[in-house]
Image (cartoon, grey):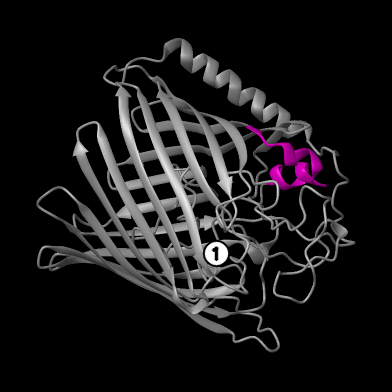
Amino acid sequence: MNTPFTTKHFTGLALSAQRQIFSTGFSAPDGRQPAPDFGPTATRVHWLFKVKPQTSESPGAAPGEFKHQASNLKLYCLFLMLLLAGSTTAQPSGSNSDFRLRGYMKAMPGLHLDQDFGDPSFHHSFHNRLNFRWDITSDVDLRIEGRNRLLYHELYDELPGIEEIFDQDEALLDLSWLWLSDGGWIGHSEVDRLYLSWRRSSWRVRAGRQRVNWGINLVSNPNDLFNTYSFFDFDYPERPGTDALRVQHYISRLSSIEVAVSPARDNRDMVAAAKFAHNLRGYDIQALGGYFRDRVALGGGWAGHIGGAGFKGEVTWFHDIDEQQGVDPSNVVAAVGLDYMFANGTFAVAELLYNGGHNRAGEDVFLVTEPMRADDILFSEYAITLNADHSFSPILQGGMAVMVLPDIEAVFMMPQFSYSVARDLDFEFVAQIFAGGDDTILEEASHGFFGSLRYSF
């Protein structure tokens, strides 16, 4: 969740939600039921956050109620101690120290406007990233990485269950910690990397929270079964991880095989798959298959060149193990793209997505800045994305991304530029603008304008 919300609209894209969220009976904003009323300052609120429906088997917490486990607190104490220990020995990147601590601090104010570019609202966020590495031996290393965020918006104090919205971690281990909820202030920390890795000759083994990145494309990744990411979450370049055991073996200079298992609290949500990769006549190709959240998944992808342009694509077929009545048991998600570096230094990307799993079973609880599932990777069936980045000088870069969603008649635009103020100090401006989407979840989406100052260490 990279942004808060306006006083009348949540920032970014509007969300749909299942029934019984916060016991309001609120369903997707498709005309079936009205949105909940949170008072005069939030007359038509659309959810920015992904939340779990409350049921008798898993009752939701009352507003303001915190559910921190002692094990979580101990883990964070250990995390902080390791970071402190690393900071005492942290050396410049060229040193041979066994301990390394890197990270950044970022302040990011934001301005939000409604669909008519009126009704301004403001928020502010402070973001601290810490990346710790310990080279235990020449073959074994430990990584612990996470982020701490302090957010403010006046509407935080008016939303029921705001603590539950932030303090949730759906992975096997709960490594999310809400340490402040006071008025409009929210303080949140999470560990998104916590793994031990071993390497020897042609073998690589990694266990713990990590990224298992099987995607090839630059925007949409149907092959990324373990941890997809959201194209709209510009404030999270590290991208989320998953709790997994991953084993890689390099058969030859051109071929490798990889097996990964990501357990879950409910076995129906686990992912276990294998991938074979090979270079054939200048093309990197891969084939994969396995178990994906109670579905069979088979797919593949490629990366090569046509003339001077990069040519990439990936496709995955999913099929239900336990078929649901009235739901098509199979669907395909595919994406293909071209990228090209022009002589003037502009790097351009064009990508087409077919999301055959869109709203397959009427499951409409999602967050635009949160990653969706590989078998339903976007909130529309089709997407055409154009992106261009250009370096005007060694210290000034700019770019523009445009995503067209033809089936819901909507357009998303994201201009941005960054400027290096000093060696370790960078300024960035990003805007997110939405148009169209009448009678869809985008109808009440607000526009966001963000400026950030980031210090890296």
- Tell me if 343 is positioned left or right of 359 in this view: left
> 402 and 364: which one is in front?
402
The quarter of the picture where residue 446 lies is bottom right
Residue 287 at x, y percent in the picture: 34, 70
Residue 395 highlighted magenta (yes or no): no
Residue 169 at x, y percent in the picture: 66, 47
- Residue at 23 percent of width and 46 percent of height: 390
Q: Amino acid at mark 1?
A: Arg
Q: Which residues are magenta?
A: 151-168
- Tell me if 133 is positioned left or right of 209 in this view: left
259 vs 431: above or below: below
Residue 244 at x, y percent in the picture: 53, 50
443 vs 144: above or below: below
The reply to whether residue 316 is visible in this rendering is no
- Tell me if 86 is positioned left or right of 36 in this view: left
The quarter of the picture where residue 281 lies is bottom left
Q: SS of the residue at dot 1? A: loop
> 246 and 298: which one is in front?
298
Residue 165 highlighted magenta (yes or no): yes
> 310 and 367: which one is in front?
367
Pick out the residue farthest to the top: 88
To which residue does mark 1 refer? 373
- Residue at 61 percent of width and 57 percent of height: 367
Q: How many marks?
A: 1
Quarter of the image containing the C terminus?
top left
The reply to whether residue 439 is visible in this rendering is yes
- Residue at 16 percent of width and 64 percent of height: 309
The quarter of the picture where residue 80 lies is top right
Residue 24 at x, y percent in the picture: 86, 61
Pick out the residue farthest to the bottom: 326
